[in-house]
Amino acid sequence: MDFCHSKGLSKCGVSDEGYVCLALALMINPSCVKELYVNNNHSGGSAQKLLSATLEDPHRKVETLQFADCKLTDKSCEIVASVLQSANSLLQLDLSDNDLGDSGVQLLSKGLSSFNCKIHTLKIGYTFYYHLRFPD
């Protein structure tokens, strides 16, 4: 069924418990969601870490992940970089309106340069964003 191909949870006030439930749902049905939008949800790092851990599994089929304005920091970039370095299906990543800092961007750079990284589109920035396109 295609009813869960895309999940839009932007501005829903997803809590730490909500991220745990979302991660568990992805673990139970790894190929269900291809697009995940969690913009404007300010959660704790432990919940985001659990969600990211589920995305590291090569059986996950998420191709588009939007984490814009989710209060991500340089510490969150360590998790995202780990996902980018693992075998995954992620093609589009939106991290705009987060305080990634220089060290966070360096971590992302390491993840983006990984052989396993398939990202075509990366959005980062604040009131404006950089839209980077990577060749196939």
Image (cartoon, rainbow, N blue to C red):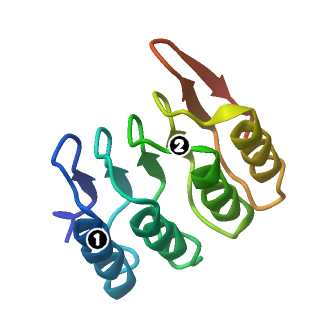
Look at the picture and state if 100 lies above or below 124: below
Q: CA distance from mark 2 to mark 1?
A: 19 Å
Q: Earlier in the sequence, mark 2 or mark 1?
A: 1
Residue at numbered disc 2: 92
Residue 121 location, quadrant: top right
Q: Secondary structure at mark 2?
A: strand
**Residue 22 has which mark?**
1
Task: Find residue 56 and report its horizontal and vertical position in percent.
Answer: 59, 72
Q: Which amino acid lies under the numbered mark 1 shown in the image of this protein?
A: Leu
Q: Where's residue 108, x and y in %?
A: 72, 45
Please state, as top left, top right, bottom left or bottom right, where the C terminus lies in the image. top right
| Rendering coords of residue 79 (x, y %) | 62, 61
Seen at 46% across and 61% down, the residue is: 45
When the figure is inspected, residue 105 is found, relative to residue 5, above or below; the finding is: above
Q: Residue at x 51, y 37 (%)?
A: 95
- From the top left corner, tell me how far across and down residue 48 is, in percent: 44, 62
29 vs 63, left or right, is left
- Mark 1 burial class by Cα count in 10 Å: few <14, some 14-19, many 20+: some
